[in-house]
Amino acid sequence: MSEQEIKVPDLGGADEVEVIEIIVSKGDSVEEEDPILTVESDKASVELPSPGAGKITSITVKVGDKVKEGDVVGTMEADGGASESDEASESKPDEEAEQASKSEDKPEESKPAPKKSGGSRKETVKVPALDGFDNVPVIEINVSEGDSIEADDPLVTVESDKATMEIPSAFAGKVGKILVSEGDKLSEGDDLIEMTVEEEGGEPEGDEGAEPEPAPKEQGKSEGKPEKKAAPEPQGATYEPPAPGAKVHAGPAVRKLARELGADLTRIKGSGPKSRILKDDVQAYVKSQLQQAQQGGSVGTGSGIPGVKLPDFSQFGDIEKEAMSRMMAATATNMQRSWLNVPHVTQFEDADITDMEDFRKAQKAAGEKKGVKMTPLPFLLKACATALAELPQFNVSLDMDKKEVIRKKYIHIGIAVDTPHGLMVPVIRDVDKKGLWELAAESADLAQKARDKQLKPAEMQGACFTITSLGGIGGTAFTPIVNTPEVAILGVSKAAMKPVWDGKDFQPRLMLPLSLSYDHRAVNGADAARFTTVLSQLLGDIRSLLL
């Protein structure tokens, strides 16, 4: 064994990039090219691969750190006995046995198969003819340095003013240096990537090397068994709702297969090492989805809904295309999934917050001493926590596959924050155990982190309920979308002075519009009305929050 530094490889022209995920831990055993951590530039997310096989001894960076080419991100004990030559020698008896078995079944094939040479050469892949287009911009890099790819696997995606095209690899082998970056403009003959190409009879190492299916297939042939493929294991076909920002571990060939079959890799559970997605997983997933569609569709998956085919908008006038940000794409996917899966109903109510606002404004001097601004949000958080404790049917999640209700014994509430980068929802934990000043400070801190893109993944997970407020902008009411697997969300609109009848006269009162959207599978209408009534009472007389 020998200790080896894990360094950041060439980042394709990017300078400093941010670490957004640590994939391995100290003590983990990894193979060459296994992902160590994920970094993100302003254009793409990239997994940094292990330089060899061995055991991780340390990781010297954390999520949020900035790294650049050559930086040390950890150390590992490299395996001394995992060379290609050793693997070849270990597999030799199996190969000889396989050839002997073949010779018994097929007498005419008496000669043993030639050994793989393992030779390689360097090639530079160039841009082929682009059907008459010139200077087309690169909009996506489909491979990373170290990836093992097949001939015709897509290397980069380019977009002209009329079409989007993938430029395929002319060779099979391992990707070396990527010579272009997103935004570069390409023409026929430009250099694209450098790669190592295996000579005839060789076989490149790579992502697909972990797939175990070739040996059993050959064994089946040698024993004279029919060549019919075994059905893929069902566990690779299960539907897995994608988490926000979720990463996919799959090789280029698997990604290409998924694109061809229209499969969303974020929904597939991988059966390979470290949950890596294999080709069989993709095929099994597609097969299961087809079976569900033929049986009428799985309840709640939104299957069978036709897509929207867009026209060529340029025929109507000038247009400009812009790629969705990673956050926008994740939000769009989550909102669509929630809307398709959750039967939404919205309950409306007005809360009289006249006295609450008088009390809040009276705390201005105290807030200046504490360095904390008291906004209406802490009162809303405290009222919602009390209502969740009183009506626990709102503090659940549904497992429709197992037909189970998951009841939560904690009260964590998400607060939707409008940022220049998109909507983010940090989570305040144990709201029921915190006072108004503590909630005011924590909510302000998390909102600022969201605007500065400094939230950690753990700070956006675990919510039981969400509050989204448009009161600072305007509007009288709206119907927010439930943030599944939660079962309810409270929308807050702009407060307004309204005449309220007190039994004798109309009195001017400050009324706050509340919109409670809920999952009708978990919550019935009567309970929703009770929930908004409790909120209205608590906000109308904040002394009740102390009881």
Image (cartoon, grey):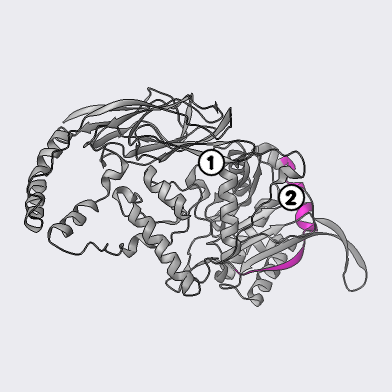
The answer to whether residue 334 is above or below residue 421 is below
| Residue 236 appears in the rendering | yes
Left or right of residue 325, residue 80 in this image = left
Asked whether residue 362 is drawn in magenta, I would say yes
The answer to whether residue 215 is above or below residue 196 is below
User: For the N terminus, which image quadrant?
Assistant: top left
Q: Quadrant of residue 285?
A: bottom left
**Which of the pair 375/426 is nearer the observer?**
426
Left or right of residue 139, residue 467 in this image = right
Residue furthest to the right in view is 505
Q: Which type of secondary structure does the marked residue at label 2 adopt?
A: helix
How far from the left and from the top, in percent, is residue 387? 62, 66
Asked whether residue 308 is drawn in magenta, I would say no
Pair 2/1: label in front: 1
Q: Which type of secondary structure does the marked residue at label 1 adopt?
A: loop
| Residue 263 appears in the rendering | no
Left or right of residue 20, residue 341 in this image = right
The answer to whether residue 334 is above or below residue 184 is below
- Read off the magenta span: 343-365
According to the picture, the residue beneath numbered tag 2 turns out to be: 360
Q: Quadrant of residue 48?
A: top left
* Neighbourhood count class around disc 2 (C-alpha, 10 Å): few under 14, some 14–19, many 20 upward: some
* Neighbourhood count class around disc 1 (C-alpha, 10 Å): few under 14, some 14–19, many 20 upward: some
Which mark identifies residue 455? Answer: 1
Residue furthest to the front in view is 108
Residue at figure coordinates x 62%, y 76% from the top left: 524
What is the number of callouts on the image?
2
Q: Quadrant of residue 526?
A: bottom right
**Which of the pair 483/137 is nearer the observer?**
137
How far from the left and from the top, in percent, is residue 405? 47, 71
Residue type marked 1? Leu
Determine contact: label 2, label 1, CB under 8 Å.
no
